[in-house]
Image (cartoon, rainbow, N blue to C red):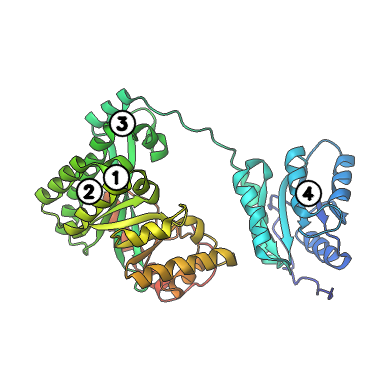
Amino acid sequence: MSTTQPPILPPCLPNDHPWRGQNVLVVEDSIVQRAFLVDMLKQLGFGAILEASDGNEALALLEREGAEAMFLVLTDLEMPGMDGIELTCQLTERHLAQNLIVVSARDPRLLEIIESMGSEDADVGLLGTLLKPVRIEALEALLQRAGQGHAAAQPAPEMPSERELALALERNEFLPHFQPKVSMQSGQLKGVEALARWAHPQRGLLGPHHFIAALEGTPLMTDFTLAIVRQVLRRLLDWRVAGLPPMTVSVNLSADNLADRGFIDRLTALVLASGVAPAALVWEVTETSVMQQLSRSMTNMGRLRLMGFGLAMDDFGIGYSSMQQFARCPFTELKIDRAFVHGAARWPNRHVVLKSALELGQRLGVDTVAEGVETADDWHLLRDLGCDMAQGYLLAKPMPAEELTGWIMHERRRLRALAGGEGRSGREEQ
């Protein structure tokens, strides 16, 4: 293995870093690489720095240290004896480390396995992963997360009763928030997605995971969807009067609604009576909703397209036959799921899947929308791959309708800069 030059580090560091003076264990079978990491950690202000050559030695050392969990374990992935993946599992099960960083020079997809473990298990305390050779800036950026704590797994919210939901509908407590969809070539606002919120009189503003599951499969879902659509139509007319540029609004349709001819009749009558052109609305459906009652759903989608509405396949890529259903149905828009967008600039396998999905949309002549765009790196990758629109926290969180005009005014310059290729790295503030 080639020798590695010692890191070039800043001459001084502030004293308020959460890791300053804390103990750390470095697990690395290469003496040269281990010395490199130890020197880097010393310069970053850690206290006692312990060393181990593989997972077995690391576990024995941690047990000798006593009951208190080590502040940080920094481990290689590929080692003789016990590898980094097994060590990660052991650290989690035995609660021997507060924080964990995994490094490797191997296939980045192996590191993605570790990150997946961290995202699914809150007990891991994973700060992140790094490719070798480790850069001091990247290590310090991960260490900043140690002071933020780790989100504990949240229990599933208690679902409201049908009676509570019916009262909320009577009181007009459900309302849409709007998340912008931005052109990747110009930075201009092209549309918004309407995302339902519940203005609960006691619990405050609630997201859809607090009530959508309780609505599904009940007659209330029809009333709920039509209530959201009525508000969307009013907002479109208000924005037209206010002089906002033309845009589309996307609204989600449930599986039951999509397959119900009577609902489609009520929906289209509502829109046609409002004075809003059908082309201003995009109905979003998932593959799962289409598949539940395939024949009826496809018939109703055909009717909606004939009337001039847009149709989007939402969460593309996560179903078992997404490509087949997309080719069979009259979609005008392809929304690529966040699972393939977030981190695509970093993970090669996500990059490949993302590129394939975009090429499919481009060849079929539909608009492509990337969901979950959170970093400038992912934005620029998507732009280079020819994606049409982006949606995500890099651009904006969902907001009340009243805030949209101000957001356009305030963010116009930043969005143009993104579209022009400025700021090609780094995570944006959310």
Say few, some or many: other residues with alpha carbon within 10 Å of mark 1 (under 14 / 14 to 19 / 20 or more).
Answer: many
Disc 1 and disc 4 in contact, CB within 8 angstroms: no
Q: Position of residue 150 (x, y in %)?
A: 62, 43
Disc on res. 232: 2
The residue under label 4 is which amino acid type? Leu
The residue under label 1 is which amino acid type? Pro
Q: CA distance from mark 2 to mark 1?
A: 7 Å
- The residue tagged 1 is 176
Of the image marks 2 and 1, the number of the one nearer the N terminus: 1
Task: Say if residue 184 shows up in the picture.
Answer: no
- The residue tagged 3 is 218
Q: What's the residue at 77%, 51% (across, down)?
A: 73
The residue under label 3 is which amino acid type? Thr
Q: What's the residue at 87%, 41% (across, down)?
A: 65
Quarter of the image for residue 133 reads bottom right
Q: Is residue 24 left or right of residue 259?
A: right
Q: Is residue 194 left or right of residue 16?
A: left
Task: Say if residue 55 shows up in the picture.
Answer: yes
Question: In front of the other: label 2 or label 4?
Answer: 4
Q: CA distance from mark 3 to mark 1?
A: 20 Å
Q: CA distance from mark 3 to mark 4?
A: 47 Å
Callout 1: helix, strand or loop? strand
Callout 4: helix, strand or loop? helix
Q: Position of residue 122 (x, y in %)?
A: 63, 42
Quarter of the image for residue 360 reads bottom left
Question: In front of the other: label 3 or label 4?
Answer: 3
Of the image marks 2 and 4, the number of the one nearer the N terminus: 4
- The residue tagged 4 is 87
Q: Position of residue 66 (x, y in %)?
A: 86, 37
Say few, some or many: other residues with alpha carbon within 10 Å of mark 4 (under 14 / 14 to 19 / 20 or more).
Answer: many
Disc 2 and disc 1 in contact, CB within 8 angstroms: yes
